[in-house]
Amino acid sequence: MAQRILVRVEGMEQAWADPSEEQLFDLISELNLRNQYMIVDRVGAPNDQYYIQLRISDELDFYDIEYRDGSPDTHFTAVVDRDNEFAAQELVSRVITQWAFERDGWREALPWRPWTPERCNCCGQTITTSGQIDFRLYRPEVAIDMPRDAVHAVNPGLLRVDGVGAFARCLLPIALTEGVTMVFGAWMKISDADLERAASVWHEDAYKDLVLQGTFANVIKPWGEEILDAPLTAVVRNVDEIPYVDASDHPLLHRMLTEPWNRDYVLGFFGVALPVTFRESIGGDWTIERTAGLAARVEGTTLTFTGPGRTVHIDQFTAGRDRPAEEFLNTLLKGAPDVPVSQSSRQETGVEVRYCFWLANTVDGKQQNEVYCFVAWPGAVLRVVFVHDDPSETERAWAMHVFNSVQYHG
């Protein structure tokens, strides 16, 4: 029997081909703040726009469930409250199982509504070009896997965690090059006395003078665990905001607060859709522009960018450095469709050869526009395939712009 579905869970390297109903149920039951997303792809579908996915909310109080039925205009979403945790898990498991095994009932099981595509996956806000990127870390690191009844909110900015201690929410601003700032809504561990003091002034005029001493309580890419438990001071800069991390004598956290960091290097660690365009590294030898609003994921050896109406698949190929670029390119083009000269482009600059062609296919009665691009060097080729729903020249111009952004650094 041909493979039907492929299941991936965010944060897990393993993928599951045609899991059983019991395995699907178990995977859903194991979703948590470290592994929030489960994506089920329909293998062998006409395109990669056939999937259903599940996300557990940051407060673990509801599920977001979405499906796409072949194109962006068949993308729907629903919310399932987790007031009754077991009933909610049973419901979403049943819907996903029925979808996966192509059974009836899943469309009628939930109040589906059209998905709004202009929301950013990292912050939920409308995607616009911005100089600031906000990330919210919903729990301290030690509390991520703890049950809900062990984490007690004093107010939206203060927590008590059973057996661990007290925490205050804080903002960590990090300046990136090219005028971009990342602001993490993170947590700091504080004393019980400071928790009581902060709670007493949180909604009072005295809040403006609040100063908290503590240690950083989250792990953030790309700095990792080195900043976990780093000492810091947080102060109120704006009475309408939570306190800002203002100073630290920890060497790395001090650098994060005082030095600009390479924008492309830092943003490349985040696979969610971002509101800014930046240059993504591919295997250390290539870089390419990732357009604002496109999420990134790796499937096998293919890097894929996806967003509303746009998909980009990127693969790199290597051989001995003595293999000429032209010969390597011709090998990869074997079996490619013949297209008119007017639907292709070729450039040679020194040892580099760039070639692309474009065509339109009809999938389920709808036009799908594809641009196939290759950048060839001796012993190395990058293939970039663009799929876009809009047939306009503007969209092909976007694809060509991203294609032209490819650089080889090997």
Image: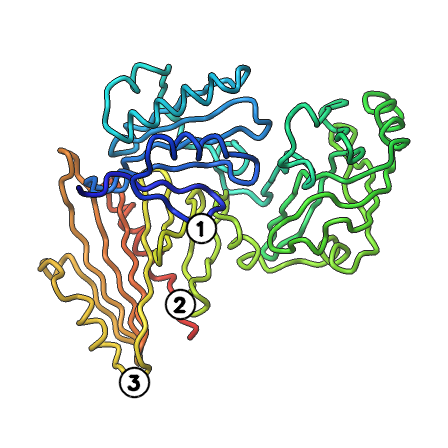
From mark 2 to mark 1, how far is it between C-alphas? Answer: 28 Å
Q: Earlier in the sequence, mark 1 or mark 3?
A: 1
Depth check: give the residue in front, 64 or 114.
64
Instruction: Give the residue type that dot 1 points to.
Output: Glu
How many badges with numbers are in the image? 3
Please tell me the numbered disc located at residue 13.
1
Taking the spot 37% from the left edge, 16% from the top edge, the residue there is 110
Instruction: Give the residue type that dot 3 points to.
Output: Asp
Q: Residues within 10 Å of mark 1 (few under 14, many from 20)?
A: few
- Residue 366: image quadrant is top left
Q: Position of residue 215 (x, y in %)?
A: 80, 45
- Residue 61: image quadrant is top right
Q: Residues within 10 Å of mark 2 (few under 14, many from 20)?
A: some
Instruction: Give the residue type that dot 2 points to.
Output: Gln
Left or right relative to 191: residue 53: left
- Give the colour scheme shown: rainbow
Q: Earlier in the sequence, mark 2 or mark 3?
A: 3
Taking the spot 83% from the left edge, 37% from the top edge, the residue there is 190
Left or right relative to 345: residue 321: right
Depth check: give the residue in front, 369 or 13.
13
Q: Image quadrant for the N terminus?
A: top left
Q: Position of residue 167 (x, y in %)?
A: 77, 34
Q: Earlier in the sequence, mark 2 or mark 1?
A: 1
Please tell me the numbered disc located at residue 2.
none
Q: Position of residue 93 (x, y in %)?
A: 39, 25
